[in-house]
Image (tube, helix red, strand yellow):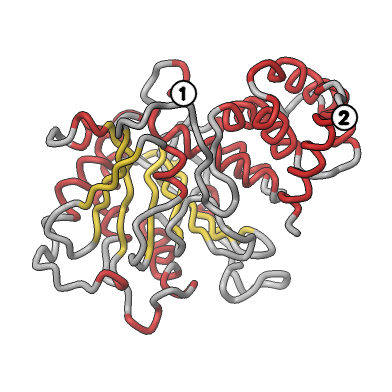
Amino acid sequence: MSRRDNLKLVVGELFAFGIPPAEATEALIRADCAGPGAIVREMVEQGGYSVVAPVTDRALLVLGPGFEEIVEAAASTGLESELDPGGVARTTSRPSALYYAMVYFPSGGKVAQLQQSSSLSQLFGVAEQGYGIYTYVISGAGVDDGDVPNSETYRELLRVIETYVISADGDGAVPRQQAHSFLVPVDAARAGESLLDQTGPELSAHGRKAYAVYLESQGQRELARRLLTRPGPFLVSSLEPRLIPSERSAPRLVVDLSDVGAEYMFSVVDAYDRAIPESQVGSLESLQPIRSRLIDLMPDAVASGVNRGRTAGDWVYMLGPRQIARAAYDVNQPGETANGG
């Protein structure tokens, strides 16, 4: 059984025996039964709104300073019945109307594809199958306060995706399995409007929090914190038709555009929007060229014309079964594998 399955059973037993949620949370954390975020999420998911305060208060008391963002995100994902690691959406209390949609912008496609659902969990967890690479467009921190984080870059990214991807190679000649696709969550009721008017950072905040909690549960606390605190936007690329990996070894390419100026968005989108060589379909090698093209955009990480003292490793990450390979590093250095995983 996976650690996630074990945690679910243990939490269920604790609730069944009437153990107070705060005490159960402290016991699970001190016993290192899972990452703190995973524990809080599971406690809230099974216990509901009434346990949020005791669970989060006790978790923060035990963990101390520095865990506020991950605990809050975990409680939020638990309440919203977010994605499980296998990408299966849980039942929500929302009515059956199709409130949400995911717009697909595939390379070489004439028109964007639309997937509708009453659940954001389902849209992030069960994508349309058959594409070679799925890149989720995710907003950054700040949306919860009513702001549009890094709005200039965010708006330009959406504009370029909408206008450039569909118009480029629009003869539909790229086979679907060799096509990269951008995925943008939208309001289903706004179909036909511009992409910017259809979407909003609050829609992708759902997936951002769920993915951050997953990263924290895998020991990637630094990257999880980035998703919860930085303005973004973020691009998360997967070979699977889901945001959260089905297993730890499933690769992900994560790009943090917080310090990348709006004037770079055309080049960023172009780095993704290429047909995948047939020999690379379904393999980690299909992500490597994207990674390389992004690094080449700013080898010294001079963003928006201002030298911010960052390396490329501060914005491009390749995740694999054992560690993160930052873009600025030589992935063949001791301790890292040639595929960056």
Q: Which mark is residue 131?
A: none
Q: Which residue is mark 2?
A: 17
Crowding at dot 2, Cα within 10 Å, few <14 / some 14-19 / many 20+, comes out as few
Question: Does 47 sit left or right of 308 as displayed?
Answer: right
Helix, strand, or loop for circle 1? loop
* Amino acid at dot 2: Phe
Residue 171: image quadrant is bottom left
- Percent position of residue 221, x then y: 68, 43
Of labels 2 and 1, earlier in sequence is: 2
| Mark in front: 2 vs 1 | 2
Question: Does 306 sit left or right of 171 as displayed?
Answer: right
Q: Which residue is found at the position 83% from the left and 44% from the top?
A: 33
Work out which quarter of the rendered image holds the N terminus and state it: bottom right
Front residue of 229 and 311: 229
Helix, strand, or loop for circle 2? loop
Residue 29: image quadrant is top right
* Cα separation between marks 2 and 1: 39 Å
- Percent position of residue 115, x then y: 28, 47
- Hey, which residue is sitting farthest bottom in the picture? 279
Q: Which residue is found at the position 41% from the left and 40% from the top?
A: 138
Crowding at dot 1, Cα within 10 Å, few <14 / some 14-19 / many 20+, comes out as some
Q: Which residue is mark 1?
A: 142
Q: Which residue is found at the position 15% from the left and 55% from the top?
A: 166
* Amino acid at dot 1: Gly
Work out which quarter of the rendered image holds the C terminus and state it: bottom right
Q: Which residue is found at the position 81% from the left and 23% from the top?
A: 21
